[in-house]
Every structure is written in C-alpha cells, then in structure tokens.
Image (cartoon, rainbow, N blue to C red):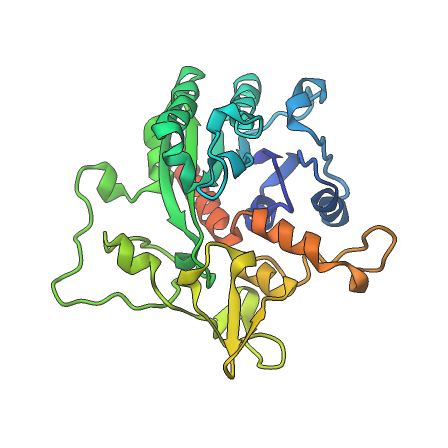
Amino acid sequence: MKYGSVCSGVEAATVAWHDLGWEPQFFSEFDAFPSAVLNHHYPDVPNFGDMTKYKEWNLNEKSIDLLVGGTPCQSFSISGLRKGLGDERGNLMLEYLRMADELKPKWIVWENVVGVLSSNGGRDFGTFLTALGKIGYGFAYRVLDAQYFGVPQRRRRVFVVGCLGDWRSAGKVLFESESLSGNPPPSRKKGERVAPTVTTGPPYARTGNDRVETEAYVTFARVGHGHYSDKNDIASTVRARDYKDATDLVTQYDMKVRRLTPKECERLQGFPDDWTKIEWRGKKPELCPDAPRYKAMGNSMAVPVMRWIGQQIKQVEEEEKNG
C-alpha cells in the first residue's frame, strides 16, 4: 500500500503502518518543528509543506492507494471559536477533498475532533460527507477513543474512512461484520461490569454506555513498546478522565502532582521514546526544548488507533483479493 499524508505532524500514520509494509510517498507538513522531526526520521520521503499548493507538487510519479490526514481542528474544537468552514483552517478539509478528487486513491482516512460533528449545527461535517460522496467515495465514520487501544489517556476523535465507489468496504474497516449485517453484538448481561483498564484489541465500545467507557480510570503500569513505570522516571498511574489530551494530563505519585514530561506524552500517544527529541536550531537532541515537543504530541493522532485502522484496511483488502 502506497500512501500520501497531509497535515502530517510527526507522522503517527507512518509509525503505525511501518510494520504493515506500507510505504509513504510524500508528507505535507508546514510547521518547522514537526517538519524537522520528519526529516530526522524519514529523510528520503519528500515533505511538500503547504497542502494548499498541492497542484505544484509534481505528483506524476507519486501515485497513491491511500490519502491520510487530520486537517487542523481548531475551528471545530469546542474550546475554539467554532467558526467552522468560515475559518481558513476549517476549509483545509475541503482542500483535502480536492486533493483526493485529483489523485483518486482507493482509500482515504480523515481524522478530527468530535466537535466537528456539531460545528455549525452539524452542517460543516455534512458538507464534508456530501462532498466526499460527490467525488465518488463510499464512506463510514466513527468516534474512537484512544484509551481502548492500549494508551492511558482519553482521546476521542472522529475517523472517516472512504473507499472509492464502495461504502461497504469502508464500513467493514470501522465496524464489526455483525453490525453491518443488521445483527449487532449482544450488550452486556445485567450485572456485568466494565473493567476500568486499557485493552489492546477489539472489541471496542461494546458496552453501548459511553459514560462508563469514557470515564474509566486507566492503569499506567505498562504502556506501549513494553515500557514499565518507574517511580524515578514516570508516574505509576494516570487519571485519564479529567483531561482531554496528552499535553493536559498531570500525574500523581506520593501525593505530588507534576506536568508530564515530553517522553511521557510520546508514550501516551503510542510513539517510541524520544521520537521528538531531535537536533533543533543548532542545539543537540539533549537540549531540544520541551515546548515544541508538547505541541507536536498534542496535535498528533494516537498511533495505536491508526495501527488498528491500517490493520482493518489490510484485512478488507485481503478478503477482497481472496474473494
């Protein structure tokens, strides 16, 4: 699978999909620090910068099977001004669609904050989906929470998966086959409780009780990449329900509260340790400032969620290939 990434950030998609054997053909990241992180890890993948200039990119030799992107969410965030498509940043989602229309990849994966569902009374998201259909894509969308994919933070995001000419394939990526056939999986039996712990595989959101699932306390005993907590390095627990994303979280150990370190924020998003610890503005990696590292993680997608979506797409592709 060859893919292009826009609004790439520090590339959660590529970290997630590397083990699938998928190959990035290009990135599109404008900000200086994330661009430096991309150049550090992927020096052979071109970063074209500003996505609004995609017609100047000369993509003749960069045909792709998938286009992935999380266009800026500030104009759709509940904490923002909620200007929606009246904000230039919001209009980047339409630029994303124009690019998809020109490149015609089989798959698209688009991510945004849940505020996009109610922006402008839902009309902004409706505009996006309508335009997606008009350029030939069947689609499905779903809210996924990173805390159920193996990272100890509550991070609910809207994911739209589109497949050229085929909504059922898109639906298979985001939903269980039972749901698509009109036979949803059974709900919990009376008296059963939801364990307040992170899981690493499906099913997700099986309870049908959003309040229970999104208010779970999440144990920080072990997080991605086999890292265990160490009281000299990382707090033993994270109370995930009170904070909306990685950079807002605080930890508690021996009744002391402190801000998370950049490394801990990387772990919360599922990245390898020190992914953003790079040489920056002439300073060695060990002197890389914290502020841009926090911002990069706060703006990123969660790697385990993207990994699951990639695995689902791969499974659908294999099923279709095998008939």
Q: Is residue 298 above or below residue 78?
A: below
Residue 322 in sight = no
Residue toward you, 58 or 264: 264
Q: Is residue 269 above or below residue 75?
A: below
Q: Nearer the viewer, residue 94 or 85?
A: 85
Horizontal side, residue 2 vs residue 219: left or right: right
Task: Point out the image quarter for the N terminus.
Answer: top right
Q: Residue furthest right?
A: 282
- Residue in the image at 46% along x and 59% along y: 243
From the viewer's perspective, is 288 left or right of 260? right
Whether residue 82 can be seen here? yes
Which residue corresponds to the image point at 42% horizontal and 28% vertical from the top-left?
A: 163
Q: Quadrant of residue 172?
A: top left
Q: Residue furthest bottom?
A: 254
User: Is 85 displayed left or right of 232 in the figure?
Assistant: left
Residue 68 location, x and y as percent? 54, 35
Query: Which residue is found at the position 46% from the left and 34% from the top?
Result: 82
Q: Position of residue 42 (x, y in %)?
A: 72, 45
Rendered view: 319 above or below 197: above
Q: Measuring 69% from the left and 29% from the top, which residue is drawn there?
A: 50
Image position of 234 with respect to 77: above or below: below
Question: On the rendered structure, is 132 left or right of 265?
Answer: left
Quadrant occupied by the C terminus? top left
Counting every numbered tag in the picture gives 0
Q: Quadrant of residue 277?
A: bottom right
- Residue 303 on image: x %, y %: 53, 52
What x and y, as percent, mark residue 199?
A: 38, 63
Seen from this angle, which residue lies furthest front? Answer: 81
